[in-house]
Image (cartoon, grey):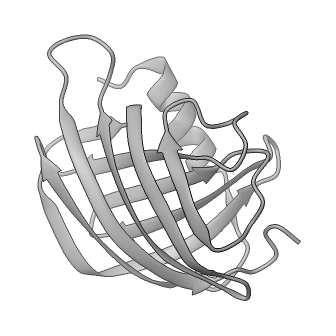
Amino acid sequence: MLNRSALMLAFMIMAGTAVAEPGSGSFQITGDFEANTDDATASIFLNERVNIRMFQVRADRHMVTLFFSRDFTPAPGTYPIQFNYLNAKNTLGGSVIVSGDDYVMLSHDTEGTAVFEVFDEQIKGTFEFTSYDGSQEPRQQVTVSGSFDMPRGSVFR
């Protein structure tokens, strides 16, 4: 059963509008859930209603989403991925949706890094972070790592 925060986050993710053609990506999920794909789609989205910019790497029924903080200056470099990202400068938030027999969103106490090798007409880089499915024990935990290479589109213009 999803909690209210997870439902709101899922709605915000689904309500985004793609702002560029999709690119490519890959990711590996380890921990309480396992997934590995070298054939994922990477796309950048903008949710204008709540001004959230994000990108997603999707494959099969699994999805990794990285959210840009409101005060994010696009440039190559290494950036933190953390749970309280939205109002922090140059920070990202992260979530993982694992779908199989159950649908699980892991987005609590997120911690890791994203490296943008290129951030111009293309956005290219890698990420790795750990995330949990909630704040109450027992908690499920995953570590996700991956890469992305996608057109920038109209985001950050």
Camera sees residue 107: no
Going by the picture, which residue comes out furthest to the front?
77
Please say if 109 is above or below 32.
above
Please give the name of the residue rendered at 49% of the width and 32% of the height, measured from the top-left corner. 83
Find residue 148 and report its horizontal and vertical position in percent: 45, 77
Q: Residue at x 22, y 75 (%)?
A: 37
Q: Picture coordinates of residue 150 (x, y %)?
A: 57, 83
- Where residue 101 appears, as percent x and y from the top left, is 13, 45
Answer left or right for 49 relative to 39.
Answer: right
Write the residue at 48% across / 61% down: 114
Residue 41 vertical position relative to residue 104 in the rendered view, above or below: below
Hey, which quadrant is residue 69 in on the image?
A: top right
Is residue 66 at all visible to an observer of this figure?
Answer: yes
Residue 107's place in the image compared with 46, above or below, is above
Quarter of the rendering containing residue 6? top left
- For the C terminus, the image quarter is bottom right
Residue 13, compared with residue 2, is above or below; it is: below
Please give the count of numbered marks on the rendered protein: 0
x and y percentages locating residue 151 in the rendered image: 65, 85
Q: Please state, as top left, top right, bottom left or bottom right, where the N terminus lies in the image.
A: top left
Q: Nearest the camera: 62 or 153?
A: 153
Residue in view at x 59 percent, y 68 percent:
77
Q: Which residue of the protein is positioned furthest toward the right in this rendering? A: 157
